[in-house]
Image (cartoon, rainbow, N blue to C red):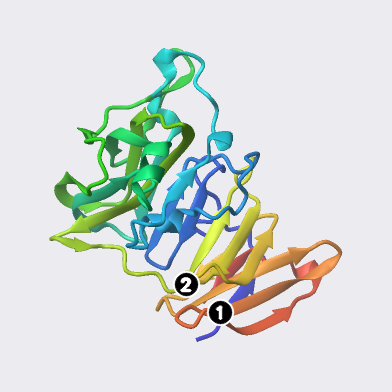
Amino acid sequence: MRLWLTTCLVLLGHACFGDGLGHAVVTPDWTIETSEDLANGTRGKGSYPVWQLVDRDPRTAWVYRANDYPKPKNEHRQNFAGNYWIKFEPSGSVWLDELRIRPGYQKTPSLWRKNSRPTQIQVFDRLPMEWNDAVKGWFLGKPMRTVDLADSMDEKSVRLPKRKYAELYVVFSKIERGAVDDLCISEMMPRAGGKDVIQPLTSFMYSIGSDCGCSGAFWLTKPNGQKVATADYEYPRFSFSPDGRYVAGITDADNRPPRVWVAELARGKVVWSGRIPSNERPEELIW
């Protein structure tokens, strides 16, 4: 299998996310993205990343830091749903019939009580926000399901219409505020036929978006947090091989020729790297 570099202006899928502010983990089969504004937020890479939603360990959590989202202006907007969401997007449509969720930081009962957690979610099979031409603004659309969650540490099961999904958005429409106003979720997993649809992670791409929606950093990272390689470009480029065994990325450094690397996903190890002339500056990776 060979990797070709081209200079055509074609962007790879997943190179730019929705509104450009997402915090995401990308695997050959799934992209999990959040509405976090980390471009101007304070957490940076943090120690509560989004992949902890699907690590099958309730002692870990994804945490939406209070400093990374705006405070509501009044009580009416306290639970404005459009501010907080998670998106699950498979590489191709998949059958789903259930969503499992463990709200709050469930490492200990005291941490669960101390932090904020959702008490209601709304589930969409499309972008939750809809544009209204009459008033020139975005509004929350009609959800597929609205589900109240018991404010407890046990795992919740949310039934979904059994069919194929190209994407699934989970919006946190009501939040129980804790003494520490950080929104926490310990686990969240789409399922079908009683089985998890996201396989245990070996290695993955992890990204932080930016204001423009096109630049940012993508890291190949092992589940233990070890960073293996970085794709960092004006328009970040990375690509999984068709068989899902390898990933390639381009790293651009100021006043230096871009570097291209290829890593084997199962081992999380770079197997080839090299620099290319600056005047060739590739725009696409083709396997």
Residue at the disc numbered 2 = 203
Residue 188: horizontal and vertical position, in percent? 31, 51
Q: Residue at x 37, y 65 (%)?
A: 29
Cα separation, mark 1 vs mark 2, equals: 10 Å
Q: Residue furthest front?
A: 110
Amino acid at pointer 2: Ser
Query: Residue 140 has which mark?
Result: none
Residue 263 position by quadrant:
bottom right
Establish if 233 lies above or below 176: below
**Few, some or many C-alpha atoms within 10 Å of disc 1 (few <14, some 14-19, many ≥20)?**
many
Label 2: element kind: loop
Label 1: element kind: strand
Residue 131: horizontal and vertical position, in percent? 42, 25
Q: Residue at x 65, y 39 (%)?
A: 40
Left or right, residue 274 beside residue 102:
right
Q: Residue at x 37, y 57 (%)?
A: 59
Q: Nearer the viewer, residue 244 or 145?
A: 145
Establish if 63 lies above or below 51: above
Q: Compare marks 1 and 2 and give the one earlier in the sequence.
A: 2
Q: Nearer the viewer, residue 119 or 85?
A: 119
Residue 84: horizontal and vertical position, in percent? 43, 35
Query: Residue 263 has which mark?
Result: 1
Left or right, residue 80 beside residue 246:
left
* Figure disc tally: 2
Q: Nearer the viewer, residue 61 or 223?
A: 61
Residue 107: horizontal and vertical position, in percent? 38, 53
Q: Are marks 1 and 2 in contact (CB under 8 Å)?
A: yes
Amino acid at pointer 1: Ala
